[in-house]
Structure formats: structure tokens, C-alpha cells
Image: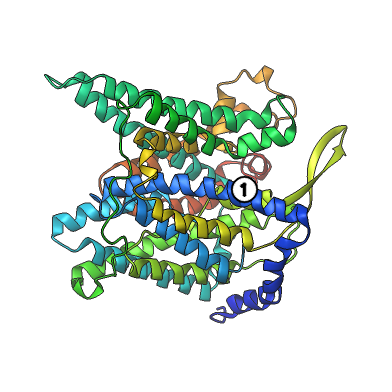
């Protein structure tokens, strides 16, 4: 058995001597300062827009008990604290889609049982934090070695589908209400305007996101357009909705600011039944936060980025637990390590060099500026953005924010090997490039492996959509690990698995 806390203390001893450098390295020359400023703007826009969208979903799922301002406050407070006291400065904390599903189920349960939502919600957050601290002290992160792309790609495709479903559901309700089953209250311009704004936002976002793969403009301009694709899409959608289509697009997504965005946890008002529920839910959700934190940490600390100051998996998990407890006591939404924001953060701070590889020019990281300034400043700006509720954030139409979800879902498919294999199955095998990985695997093997993965993803979709079952989603994700190691490894040869399921 590991000595409790030994690994976390080793993380601190490894990172603490670099703490002053973590701040000073941001000011080593004008080029570095310019890189930091650009990264801060990029990260702020990439964080604040999804935070507003998740706050909108929180408000819908909890009848306004949690909302946009609380989601922004949570991300700002958590991000500032993690950038100050965390071990890995590149990790960005953000709101998670899975956590919005849990808030909806918990709100429904507490209303049906006559319990205090904030009491149970806060106790659940406290227990999540306690379990995360225990995971840190007893080095549970070592278990992440058994997680492969089989699990991560199935989970990634499920999240992409869930984000698109969340974006389309309100539009379907509007069409049913104002177009199909409207009676004398027909107003087809409302759902049609909603559809146009969602489609326009998604189209602009995807065009900008894929600009990096085109031959237009210079490389630096194409990459900037791709990095700021979400901000450009929201800006264009807001102009179309709030200026061109006004008043038909007057979908106020933010609403009025609450009298008090912080609800100090009424912990003493929780009943024994509520405490038991919170304990069970806290353990289940701690697995979700634990998984996200470690996956995010492994992506940020990839060898290709040439980081020099060491890793901090166990201490980061410890800090994450304490931050979760604090947010729970304030009645604010909990946070996850944000993907893809964290890997994009470290990429933005890397210096690249073009090298020749087999006659092809490829980009290789020369060095990476490891600093806390970018994460801290970004989180501080997000925190200040809570003052923008209700104005000027109320001018962003609701369908534009739901377009953000669909954009995130579609762009999240990039690099998902399960999705790439689904597309490969529908592609003429004789027209596939000869150097593709799947050309080395017999079609029957690829079809069988992909079918098993799609069944697992389908189970995730069932648990995500059925009433009350989203509470068990983290357990289903964990169950995919033994399915991969005990079942799939016996059905396929190691040579084929090396191609189909390379380690993360």
C-alpha cells in the first residue's frame, strides 16, 4: 500500500522550486509577452462562451436555482485558485456537460422527495471533494494506466452526440409549439428564426475552425481564424440575431441577475436520506472528475511539448478536491478539467519549428513557456465577466448559445478514432490512402472492433437520456475499462489492438 500523501508531497517538492519562475517566465522578452497576451485573449473567449451556454442549461435544468452568473463565478473562482495553488499551470477548469445532466436529475429528485436542492447539492460537492482528496492521498491516479482510447473515444463520441442533442431539443420544442401543434397560436417565424440562427452559428464556426486545413491566407492567419472560430461564430450570430432579425430573435438567454448568486450551503438542513444520497452521488461523480483530471493532465504533459518543470498529478487532484469543496459550500456549480481548452493552452504557449521528415515539412515543438500568468489572467477575466450579467450578455440570443453546443460537439469529433473508423467503414476501401492505419487491419477485424465500441457508446447514450440514469454515467464509463482489458483483449490479437487502440 502507498504511504498516504507521499506522492502528493513529492509533487509539491518537485514543483515548488519553480513557482517564482512560473510567474517570471511570462515576461522574458517582448515575443513571450506578446504570446501570453494572445493566449489570454484566445483562452478567455474559449472559456467564457461555453460557460454562458452551460449556465443556460443549468438554469433550464434547475428552474433558475443555478444559472449563467453562477456558472461564470464558479469557473472564475476555481480557475484563479487553481492557477495560484495548483501544480500544473496549463490545466484550465471549466463547466462540464455531464455535471449539468446530474443537476437536472438531482433537482427532479429533490422536488419529488421534498428535500432542499441546495443542501443535497452542496453535500454532494463536499463528498466529491473528500473523495478526490482520498484519491490523491492513496495514489489512485496510477489506475489510469489501464484506460485506453477504447474508453476515451467512446466517451468522446457520446459527449459530441449529447451536445448536439442539447442544441436541437429546444428547437424541436419550438417547432412543436409554434408550427405543428399550435392551434390558434401559430408563429412559424419563431422556430424558423431559431433554426436559422443555430445553423448560421454552426456554419460560421465550422468554416473558421477548418480554415487551418485550407490553402487560403498565410499559416498564422489560418491558425488564428481556427483558434478564434467560436468567438467569430458567436459574434456573427449575435449580430444576425440582435440586429438583423430583431425583434423576431429576442430570445433572452441570460435573464435577470439573481439577488445573490452565492448560496451559502444549508448543510444542517439536510435529512439523513439526503446525506445518504449525497454520499452515493458524491462517490459516483468523483470518478468522473478524477477521470477528467488525469486524462487532461496526461494530454498537457505530453512529451512532444518538451515541458521541463515536472508533473503534478497527485497534488493537482488534491487541490481540485479542495476547490470542489469550496464551490459546494458557496452553492456554485462544480468544475472539471476542461477539454480541449487545457491542451490548446499548452499548444498556444509552445514555440514551433518546421523540420523535414521524409521530404515533408512538419512542425515540431522547440520549447514551451511554462507560466501561470495566462491561466490566472484568463480566470480573473472570466470572474469579472460575472458583472456582465444581465447586460451586455443578454444581447446574445439563446439559439446562438445552443449553436455553441453544436459547434463544440462537431469539432469535438476531430481526432476521435471511433468516428474516423465509422467514416472509414462508409468509404471505398480501395480509395483510402495506402499509409492509413486501418489499411493494416483486415476489414472484418475493424468492423467487429468498431461495432463493440459503438455498442458501448450506445449504452452511454441510453444512460445519458433515460430519466435518473445519468447519475450512473460515471460508473458506466468505469465499466468500459474492464470490458476493454478482459473482453476485447481476448477477441482481437495484440497486433490488431496496437493499431486500433493505441495508448492515449
Residue drawn at the location 57% of the way across and 55% of the way down: 296
| Residue 491 shows up from this direction | yes
Across and down, in percent, residue 496 comes to 65, 39
Label 1 residue SS: helix
Which quarter of the picture shows residue 142? bottom right
Q: Is residue 90 above or below residue 52?
A: below
Q: Is residue 397 above or below residue 194?
A: below
Q: Is residue 367 above or below residue 163?
A: below
Residue drawn at the location 77% of the way across and 52% of the way down: 31
Q: Nearer the viewer, residue 337 or 128?
A: 337
Q: Nearer the viewer, residue 158 or 339?
A: 339
Residue drawn at the location 85% of the way across and 38% of the way down: 357
| Residue 412 shows up from this direction | no
Q: Quadrant of the N terminus?
A: bottom right
Q: How many marks?
A: 1
Across and down, in percent, residue 38 comes to 65, 48
Across and down, in percent, residue 240 comes to 42, 26
Q: Write down the residue under mark 1.
A: 344
Tell me if mark 1 has few (under 14), some (14-19) or many (20+) residues whose alpha carbon lies within 10 angstroms of its own.
many
Residue drawn at the location 69% of the way across and 73% of the way down: 20
Q: Nearer the viewer, residue 489 or 456?
A: 456
* Left or right for 173, reference 499: left
Q: Nearer the viewer, residue 405 or 139?
A: 405
Scheme of image coloration: rainbow
Across and down, in percent, residue 404 comes to 45, 37
Amino acid at each position: 500500500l502507498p504511504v498516504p500523501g507521499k506522492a502528493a508531497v513529492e509533487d509539491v517538492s518537485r514543483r515548488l522550486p519553480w513557482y517564482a519562475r512560473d510567474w517570471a517566465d511570462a515576461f522574458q522578452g517582448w515575443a513571450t509577452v506578446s504570446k501570453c497576451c494572445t493566449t489570454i485573449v484566445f483562452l478567455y473567449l474559449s472559456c467564457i462562451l461555453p460557460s454562458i451556454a452551460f449556465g443556460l442549461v443549468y438554469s433550464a435544468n434547475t428552474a433558475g436555482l443555478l444559472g449563467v452568473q453562477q456558472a461564470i463565478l464558479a469557473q472564475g473562482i476555481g480557475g484563479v485558485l487553481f492557477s495560484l495553488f495548483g501544480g500544473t499551470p496549463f490545466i484550465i477548469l471549466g463547466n462540464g456537460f455531464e455535471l449539468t445532466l446530474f443537476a437536472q436529475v438531482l433537482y427532479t429528485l429533490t422536488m419529488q422527495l421534498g428535500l432542499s436542492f441546495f443542501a443535497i447539492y452542496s453535500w454532494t460537492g463536499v463528498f466529491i471533494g473528500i473523495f478526490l482528496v482520498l484519491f490523491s492521498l492513496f495514489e489512485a491516479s496510477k489506475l489510469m494506466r489501464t484506460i485506453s482510447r477504447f474508453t476515451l473515444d467512446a466517451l468522446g463520441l457520446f459527449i459530441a452526440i449529447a451536445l448536439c442533442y442539447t442544441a436541437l431539443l429546444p428547437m424541436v420544442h419550438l417547432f412543436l409549439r409554434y408550427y405543428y401543434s399550435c392551434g390558434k397560436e401559430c408563429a412559424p417565424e419563431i422556430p424558423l428564426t431559431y433554426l436559422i440562427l443555430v445553423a448560421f452559428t454552426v456554419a460560421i464556426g465550422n468554416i473558421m475552425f477548418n480554415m487551418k486545413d485550407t490553402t487560403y491566407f498565410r499559416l498564422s492567419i489560418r491558425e488564428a481564424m481556427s483558434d478564434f472560430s467560436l468567438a467569430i461564430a458567436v459574434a456573427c450570430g449575435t449580430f444576425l440575431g440582435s440586429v438583423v432579425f430583431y425583434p423576431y430573435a429576442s430570445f433572452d438567454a441570460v435573464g435577470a441577475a439573481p439577488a445573490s448568486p452565492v448560496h451559502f450551503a444549508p448543510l444542517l438542513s439536510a435529512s439523513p436520506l439526503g446525506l445518504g444520497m449525497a454520499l452515493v452521488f458524491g462517490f459516483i461523480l468523483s470518478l468522473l472528475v478524477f477521470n477528467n483530471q488525469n486524462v487532461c493532465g496526461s494530454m498537457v504533459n505530453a512529451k512532444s511539448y518538451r515541458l521541463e518543470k515536472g508533473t503534478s498529478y497527485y497534488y493537482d487532484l488534491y487541490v481540485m478536491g479542495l476547490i470542489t469543496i469550496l464551490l459546494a459550500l458557496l452553492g456554485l456549480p462544480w468544475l472539471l478539467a476542461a477539454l480541449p481548452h487545457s491542451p490548446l493552452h499548452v499548444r498556444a504557449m509552445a514555440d514551433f519549428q518546421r523540420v523535414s521528415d521524409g521530404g515533408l515539412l512538419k512542425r515540431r515543438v522547440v520549447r514551451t513557456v511554462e507560466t501561470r500568468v495566462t491561466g490566472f489572467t484568463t480566470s480573473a477575466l472570466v470572474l469579472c465577466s460575472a458583472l456582465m450579467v444581465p447586460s451586455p450578455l443578454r444581447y446574445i440570443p439563446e439559439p446562438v448559445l445552443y449553436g455553441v453546443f453544436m459547434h463544440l460537439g462537431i469539432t469535438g469529433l476531430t481526432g476521435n478514432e471511433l468516428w474516423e473508423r465509422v467514416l472509414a467503414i462508409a468509404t471505398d476501401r480501395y480509395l483510402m490512402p495506402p499509409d492509413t492505419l486501418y489499411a493494416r487491419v483486415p476489414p472484418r477485424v475493424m468492423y467487429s472492433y468498431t461495432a463493440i465500441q459503438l455498442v458501448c457508446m450506445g449504452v452511454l447514450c441510453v444512460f445519458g437520456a433515460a430519466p435518473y440514469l445519468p447519475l450512473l454515467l460515471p460508473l458506466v464509463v468505469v465499466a468500459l475499462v474492464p470490458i476493454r482489458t478482459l473482453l476485447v483483449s481476448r477477441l482481437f490479437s495484440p497486433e490488431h489492438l496496437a493499431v486500433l487502440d493505441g495508448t492515449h
